[in-house]
Each structure stands twice: as C-alpha cells, then as structure tokens.
Amino acid sequence: MVSDNVPQDVGRAPRSQQRQTVAPPQNLESLGARVLCTIDGKEVRVPVGTTILAAARELGIRIPTLCNHDDLCVAGVCRVCVVEVEGQRTLQAACAYPVTQPTKVWTHTRKVRQARRHIIDLLLADHYGECYACSRNNNCELQSLAKEYGVDFFRFGHPEKPRYEIDRSSHSVVRDMNKCVLCRRCIRTCIDLQEVGVLEAIHRGHDTKVATFLDKPLAQVVCINCGQCINRCPTGALRANDPTDDVWAAIDDPTKHVVMQTAPSPRAAIGECFGQPAGKAFTFELNTALRHCGFDKVFDTNFTADLTIIEEGTELIIRLYKALVQKDKSVALPQFTSCSPGWVKYIEHFYPQYLPNVSSAKSPQQMFGALIKTYYAKLQGIDPKNIVSVALMPCSAKKFECNRPEMCDSGYKDVDYGLTTRELGKMISEAGIDLPAMPKSDFDDVFGTATGSGVIFGATGGVMESALRCVIELVTGKKVENFYEHAEILPVRGFEGVRYVEIPITAVGPVPDLVKHLVPDWNWLKGATLKVGVCHGTANAKKVMEDIKAGGKFSECHFIEFMACPGGCLGGGGQPIPTTPAIRAARAKAIYSEDRAYTVRKSHENPVIQHIYKEFLTDGPCGHVSHKLLHTHYTARGKYIP
Amino acid sequence: MKAAHQGPLTFAKVQADTGLKTALNKTRAEVIAEISASGLKGRGGAGFPTGVKWNLAAAARADQKYVVCNADEGEPGTFKDRVILLEHADLVLAGMTIGGYAIGATKGILYLRGEYAYLRPHLEDALARRRQQGLLGPGITGTKGFQFDIEMRMGSGAYVCGEETALIESLEGHRGEPRNRPPFPVDTGFFRQPTIVNNVETLAWVTCILAKGAEWFKGFGTDKSAGLKLFSVSGDCARPGVYEFPLGITVTALLKEVGGEGAKAVQIGGASGHCVPASQFGRKIAFEDVSTGGSIIIFGPQRDMLAIAHNFLDFFVEESCGQCTPCRMGNVKLREGVELLEQGKCSMAYLRELCALGETMQLASKCGLGQSSPNAFLSIVSNFKDEIMGRTAAGSSVR
C-alpha cells in the first residue's frame, strides 16, 4: 500500500527517494485494511501505509511542507513538515512517515513549532537574495513559510554575498543556486518524473549543491529544456530565460512591427497569474490586453497547428504509401510527432538513431514564424527585417527552439522571442492591465480563423486526435462524426502515460484534391488498421522508445505522438506555478471546452489553410515551398557533448 | 576484567567453527532465541537488540534476504573493528553465516571502510579459505539446503555510510544518503529486500554466544547491557589501545585501567557521543547510562574544551550528507557559534538559541548522524560553561 500522491513507477530514482513499501510482508492480511490515525485529537481511518501528511489533509489539518510535491516521490529532506508521533523519540517527517498501526500525532506542539521555526531560519540563513528582487516574489514557498511562521528577523543570519555564479548558459532555464534550498524537487523532477537525469546533488554537508554532470553549464549537458524543474522549484533558484525587456524594447521602437502569436495552453492558464482558478481560458481578453500592451498584430498559433496537421499528415501518408505500396524498406515508421521541442531535444540526445522517424514538419510556432516573415510580410508590404515575431508559449523549450540556427528559413530569425505564460502575465501587469476584466476581441485577420483541432494540441493526445480527425475524413470521404460522436476521439484522450489505439479503416473514399498529387487512390488502405500511440512526459516517451527498440507493439505503430511534459503543453515548463495533477486536469478541461466552441474543428476544413495552399504554398503539402519554409532537420546530439 | 595489555581478548579463545556448527545444529528459531536470550545489543553504538532485529528479518517474507556486516568503522576515535577484522575475521564471517542461517538469507556483504582497503586481501584470503573448508558456499558444513556466501564491498570514505540505510544506498551504487525510516532495512533493505545490518563486533559476539551459550554472555555486564564490549581508547592516557571490559564499567574504573587518571573529561561514543566531565566519572558506560560504540577519547587537564567542540563540529560540517536542513545547516551555525565563543563575542542569549537549535537538530534531523551531531557541543556547553564563556579575541580566558 502506498499513499496516493506517490508515483507508482519511479524508474531510476535514488532508492532513498523511491516510493516506500511500508506494509511488512508478515502483515499481508492487513493489506487493504484501514488504521486509525489520530491527529491533534481528530480521528480518521486511513489505508495502511498512508502518510501522516495525507491523513492530515483528509482531516483538513494543514501541515506545512517544502520538499514535498504532489507530482514527485517522497524525499523527507527539508524537515519542515515534522510532527510529534506518540512513542517516537524524535520528530517525524509527516510526508514520509507511513501509518501502519494506530498512530497518535500532534502537529503543533512546542517542540514542533520550535523545530519548524529553526528549520525555516536555517534555510533563510543560506538563501541569498532579497524577496523584492526576485522573479518569484509573492509566489515563493519559502517566502510563504517565513510569513506563516512569523519570521521577522534572521535568527541565524543571512548571506551577504552570493556563493555561486548564476548559470545563464541555456536559452531556456536560468539556474541561480544562491537561492536553492536543496529541497531536491528539481532532481526528483529530472530523474524520476522526466527520467532525463541532468540534475543531481554533488558534494557533502554545507557544500552540497544541485549540479549537472561535472558541474557543466546547463547548455553543455543533455538538458532537454522542458522546464519541469522550474515549475516545481519552490523558490527563484530556477527560472526561465526571460526576454521581456527585449520584447518591450521592440514594442517601444516605432520602426518595428511586433506581432504576437498565442498558443492555446497559455490562454487556458494565464488567468492563474491574475488570481483566477485554473481551468478558465482568457483567449479573447488576452487579444485585447496584448493590443493594449502595444503588440501590432495578434495571431492564433492554432492556425499553424492546422498547417502542422496537414503537413505532418501528408508526410505520414507519403511514408505509408512508400512503405506499404512501393515496398520501400528505407522508410522510417512509425512516424513521430515533432511539435514538442523538449521531446525533439530528448530524442536528439537519447535516441539519435531514431531521428529519421521524427516528422520533418516544424512545430506550429516555427511554421508561423516562417510564414510571418514571408507570406505575411509580402501581403502587408512590410520589410521582414522590421518585423519582430514573438510567440506566447507554455514552454521553456520553445525559447531554445526559436534560437536553433536552422530556424531561419525566412531569411531572418523566424521567431525572435518565445515568451512563457508567466512572462507575458508579468508584461500585462506591468502595463497596468487586469486581464480578466478586459473586453473580448478577436484575432487579427489574415490568419484569423483557426479550428478546434489546433486548440487541443495543448493537451496530451491532442495532436493525435487532430491528425485522426483529418486522416479519417481524407481517407474515408466521410464525416468523422459518423465514427465518433461530436468528432471527439475519446480513446486518445486522458492522462494515462502511454496510450495505444487501433483505428480500423473499413471503407475508403475518393482522394481529395489536397493530396491528389501524392497518391492515386486509397484502396491500399482499405481494411487496414491504423495503429497509433500517444505518450506524455519523457519518462513515458522512454518507455515507448524502449518498446520500439525491443520490437514491441509500439514498433508496429504508424504514428506516435510524443509530448515532453506531463499532461502535454498545458503542463509545460512555462506555465504558471504551481502545477499539480488537479491544476493540469482543470486546464485540459478548459482546452477541450474551447474546442467544442469552434464551428470548424478539422484542420483541412480551415478556409484560410485551403487559401494559403492556393496562394502561397502552391505546390501543396510537403511540396517545394512548404519544404523550404515549414520543414526542418534535426541534429544527432547523443549523450556525449564535447 | 580483561584488558588487552593484560592478556588476549575473549575472541582469541573462541573457535569460530564451534559457534557456526552449534548454530547449524539448531533450528533457525532456536538460534534467534539464543541471541535474544543473551541480551546482545548492537555494538556499533545504537544498541538495538540483535535478536529483535533478526526476528523481524526472519519473519519478513521475501525470495532474497541479505546479511550486511557494517565494517565502515568511521566514528572518530574508534578502531576496535579494525583489530577484530585483522585478528578474528573468522568470528565475524561465521557470525554473518549464522545470521544468514537465522533469517534465511543466502547472501552476505561485508562493507569495508575505504580507509581499510589494506585489510581487503587478508579478508579475501579468509573468505577463500572458508569456501575451501566448506564453511561458505553451497551445503555449509554438510548441511543440506543451507548455502551462504559473502562478498566484499568497499566504502569510499563517507562517515554517513556507517548509517545503515546510507550504507545500503552506497551498496546499491547511489550517493550515500540515509533513507526515510520506516520502512526499516529488516523489511525494505538492500535492493528493497529484507536485510540485517550488523556491526563487526556484534557479529563476532554472535559466534561467541553460539559457541559458549547465552548464559555465559549474560554473566557479564548489567541487566540492560549484557556482555563484554571492546573499547577503543585514545587521548591523554598512559596506555591507549583496544580494551575489553564488561558493559557497566564506570568511567573512573576505565580510566584507572588505561592510565588516564586526572582526566578533565572523557568523550564517550566518538564525535556523536557525549562529553562526560570529571564530576560525572562515576557514571556507567552502558546503554542505560552513557552508551558508546566503543570510542573513548580522554582529555587531559590541559585541553581546551572549546577547541574540542570546534574540532567535532568541523567534522560534522564536513561529514553531514547535506540532505536534511537541520544537520546540513545546523552544524554550520553551531560551528559559527563556537567561533564567536572563541572570540568572546557570543551573547548568552545567542548561546541559548544555539542550544535550542541543538535540540531541534536532535529531534528533527533525518538520521542518527544529524540527531547526534550536536551532542558534543551541547554537553560541552552545559558542563564547561565557565571555561568557554568570557574569552577575549586573543583566545584566552579573561579570568
């Protein structure tokens, strides 16, 4: 029996940080049984092995925590949650102490209060920096604890000098170890949750610090830039590389035409930066706010999400046709999605031999970037060198992506700046705007219309669902609603880490104009079963990749969606802090309800998409122009970085 | 009382094979009952009853169990395990085998302190010899169905790896850091299997107890602290060395044996132990009074108690694993406090605050290291307040 908030599968976690099996085998009879836990005189019966912390939450008793996080396995290192347990000589960490027999607990005795106060004082004695000059001011767990425990002076002093140089090497993540309180959430995130394993504690005692391999700069190790560590850092020790000053400078520069594209996930979460509960999208209020800030045009990334579906879908059809009809053995299948830049960097480092499987289609952000400085510039008669292209993304890895040297296909840097949800929230506040109170306004035309398919890109399974909506209609010639109620392909939805779905193709229709130049007919797909996979979080991606390597069922898939972050983009490293499974579920709900509100919900039905293939990308999906602007290549990085 | 300089240790008079054969002629339950009856408690310092530990591990259901010998003798001032391993390795290896038989383990691991690497060839030879003699490997001493073998593993110099869960982490190839307890190693130990971790000396006594009987062992010591114990005696005395005394010996009696009369204080239990002042030399060295893993450091009248506190805190600042806040930061703050005392700049109010911090460290640290790290500081502050207060910046007393 384990407590609910501990992940079941902890991969290569340090043993001390792994899930605890607490039911002694001789008590097998007691498995499933409940035990009495009395906390501050209140009684609750909990399943054997429940932690004191979980039992207290059930009773509505608050025990402060710092190193504990709902997404991560138990550490028990900060000791802030210590409580008095009857019969125990020492205080026990509530987050790590399993209730296996009737237990009496006191949460705020003199000993407990003194210990907590001392622990907070000790943390502050080693925490360099001032709260008012910190990106996490007012959203810092250490600050909250200090307030909660009435800290009004530094009992054990406060550092006057920084100990470590700030690591700004990465385009995505800035590490300021002077603010680190060694809760090791980032380590557990990187090793256990994401199974990337970039961060680990080095040295001992007071010299202990969180470090990369050989303490190299973050840019020189296998960091995938997912930013999940940022989302779980209780202090300002980890933050995203913030380009807002540059964006403001561009806005202030009258010669610059500053355009913004917004992705669906930040829109579903940015309200959280303004005190709104998770699960409410502010898409159209945001449009107004962005114009108030001074952005010249506001576009919807969903438009290029639709374009991604067309390009990636076409690429899949080409691969399948070559492999199944032309019997071309060199075709790499299954095809992997490429819209998650964290995933792309992950596969470049960890499975470079599978790069041919990754769709060459760029991510929606980069497709938009390339179109803005070509198609849009021409259309508006603006010199592309005067366009500053900004992207609002839920993601820290997007910052790295837009700085990839290959992402300059327009002749300029396709996307100049990637902003996270948090950074834009800050810009909006700085402009004196209360986002929730803003009137609604639409996106600017040109790319104005998008479909619901683009919106659901934000949730795990969304890219797959969009692709399937498209492929099913293109191949069968029938409305997807004939197969799935409201065009909602539920089997690919949900939060299970890895999903495998089979879609039988019973009938085929005529080949639509869009792809006529690529395949003569669909007969070769008749009676076939389309096998697809969906996974989110690189730990799950690893499972799928290992399955493919071993020739398991995922090796027989045709198409697999990979998202680097747990929950997909809505759980991205640029999203508001904190993040929990409940918050992510609420954001997903917002995204799916936004999808339902769209009248056009399939990418290929988007009239602007149809238009752009007529006017600009004249040789069709995966044609010459689209290959130049909308497709890219990858770098086999491997794990050994010189 | 048999001190080393007066004659051989009890260990020299016990045949390891006798103990092992006696054990294998008993049932597993009988072996554990014998150990329980002897009242043997862990000789590493914590003093957990060995019989209870074995019983828990024996009752745990698992395909694989382990016996680990903790030979990471890292406590400052202790060196008796080194002597045992050098001169009586067979007793220890037989004790591990008995433990394996008792709990149903087939694998033993001897975790040897990194600094004792020079003992490794000697111990490997002993293991090879025992395998040849049929005392390790399949079918030990002709018994059907009982097989047991021992592997050696080296520590790498971290003091915290003497803490049993950190030791297990280290064995598994991880950073040596203590785990959360519960679950305990007897339930979830090496590679999550039931594991008993016993000190070198404990295992040697196990063999002796099986050879000579629980009653013989209980004939020594006190009610709550049965048996004999080895002591590593160092510091300001005429005859430092390894001694064997029954538990319950008073500090005065011990000092007399080793030529340490006139001492100002005795550090009992190493850096993590207690500093006993001369006024309390009537106290007993036993689990119920001042307990120890065997380290006795004698301080003569010329010693500066503040310098001693400073030295111990240097040790803990260096050796804290850095995992939990009270130990990682608390020792730094205590050491800073000692530095203030040395300069005569520590106020009484701040000293009280530091003592309260010491209490927090004892109560809230994750493992035994952190919990015991302020002991020396606290006992020096409470017993030598006059000596440590009122210094001048030059470091001497103003009085």
Image: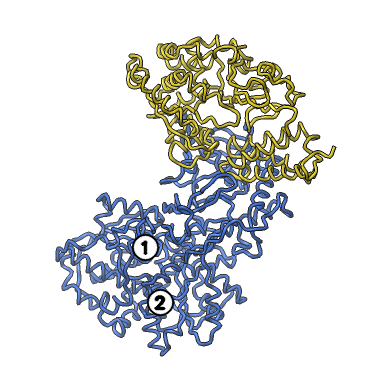
Residue projecting furthest to the left:
A326
Q: How crowded is mark 2: few (under 14 residues within 10 Å), some or many (20 or more)?
A: many
Task: Tell me the tag on residue A414.
Answer: 2
Observer able to see residue A75: yes
B63 or A277: which is nearer to us? B63
Task: Tell me the tag on residue A344.
Answer: 1
| Chain that is blue in the image | A
Q: In this view, does A316 lie to the left or right of A540?
A: left
Disc with the residue nearer the chain's start (1 vs 2): 1
At label 2, the amino acid type is: Asp
Residue at the image position 61 percent from the left and 74 percent from the top: A430
A383 to B150, vertically: above or below: below
- Percent x, y of residue B60: 44, 27
How is the protein colored in the picture?
A: by chain
Which part of the image, by quadrant, shows the C terminus of chain A?
bottom left
Q: Residues within 10 Å of mark 1 (few under 14, many from 20)?
A: many
Residue at the image position 39 percent from the left and 64 percent from the top: A340
Q: What element carries label 1?
A: helix
Q: What element carries label 2?
A: loop
A91 or B88: which is nearer to us? B88
A227 to B65, vertically: above or below: below
A274 to A432, vertically: above or below: above
Q: Mark 1 lies on which chain?
A: A
At label 1, the amino acid type is: Val
Task: Tell me the tag on residue A295.
Answer: none
Q: Distance between the residues labelled 1 and 2?
A: 18 Å
* Label pair 1/2, CB-CB below 8 angstroms: no
Q: Is residue A612 left or right of residue B26?
A: left
Observer able to see residue A496: no
